[in-house]
Image (cartoon, helix red, strand yellow):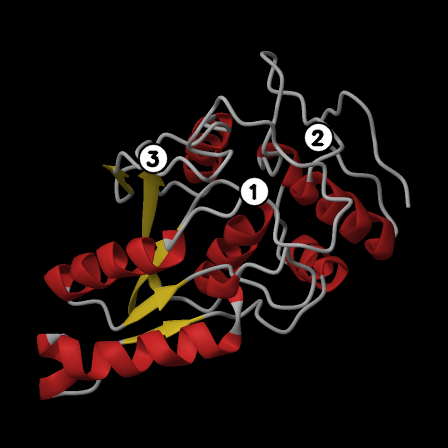
Amino acid sequence: MKTVVLFSGGLDSTTVLAMVIARGDEVFPLTIVYGQRHEVEVRKAALTLERYRLSHRAKTIALDLSFLRSSSLTNHTLVVTDGSSAAIPNTYVPARNLLFLALAAAYAEDIGASRIAIGVNAVDYSGYPDCRPEFVEAFNRLLAVGTKRGVESGDIAVEAPLLSLTKGEIIARGLALGVDYSLTHSCYAPDEEGRACGRCDSCRLRLKGFAEAGIADPVRYIERWTA
């Protein structure tokens, strides 16, 4: 089975990539560069793709979302929120996963892939509306009526294997599959050396997950947040 994997180089998407490889799919990684502040993750993605010998099959798409000024990931004049609030942080990029999945669906149809894998999670996450089960279910309904493959055979769907897992469970699953998490990047506000800030919402969730998994996070931090 051909599967397009939305691959950012982060912890979640790398785990999904390993899961899809492990079940024997023909994997087509798709990385989207959208002007994100933490573009170091794209360089990290290349290292993981080399490790899995998938560089030759990987695609990178440039999608300039810098016109979206409300997100600190695309508007670099904004300060990344530190994750201490219960509100959705300003790292939310409007409709990002909707846009990414639309591109992945087009690519999947073009190459005859029946699955699109994405690393969204609805347990340990930042409250983003496009990481919930309702979003994935709605997009699958859209694929069924809005794509040639969906209308003719119904054989195209998004799968989100991490949707109901905690971050600790995700890391444990990845380690069991041999994922090298030192090659991943999660921080939204890294320094010039690529070190994680340890304060943003993504860093906090990642560090919480490694603590739950009972191992140290192998990436470098400016400072490590503790609960």
What is the x, y in percent for residue 99? 29, 54
C-alpha gap between disc 3 and disc 1: 19 Å
- Looking at the rendered structure, the kind of residue marked 2 is Val
Q: Is residue 223 above or below residue 218?
A: above
Name the residue carrying label 2: 219
Residue appearing at x 62%, y 16% in the figure: 191
Badge 1, how many Cα within 10 Å: few under 14, some, many 20+? some
What is the x, y in percent for residue 20? 45, 63
Task: Specify which label sits upstream in the sequence, 3 or 1.
Answer: 3
Front residue of 31/92: it is 92
Q: Residue furthest top?
A: 192
For discs 2 and 3, the disc positioned in front in the rendered view: 3
Q: Is residue 21 above or below residue 75?
A: below
Q: Secondary structure at mark 2?
A: loop
Hey, which quadrant is residue 225 in on the image?
top right
Residue appearing at x 59%, y 35% in the figure: 185
Quadrant of the snapshot with the N terminus: bottom left
- Looking at the rendered structure, the kind of residue marked 1 is Asn
Name the residue carrying label 3: 33
Q: Is residue 146 above or below residue 200?
A: below
Q: Is residue 49 left or right of residue 85?
A: left
For discs 2 and 1, the disc positioned in front in the rendered view: 1
Front residue of 217/143: it is 143
Name the residue carrying label 1: 90
Residue appearing at x 51%, y 64% in the figure: 129
Task: Specify which label sits upstream in the sequence, 2 or 3.
Answer: 3
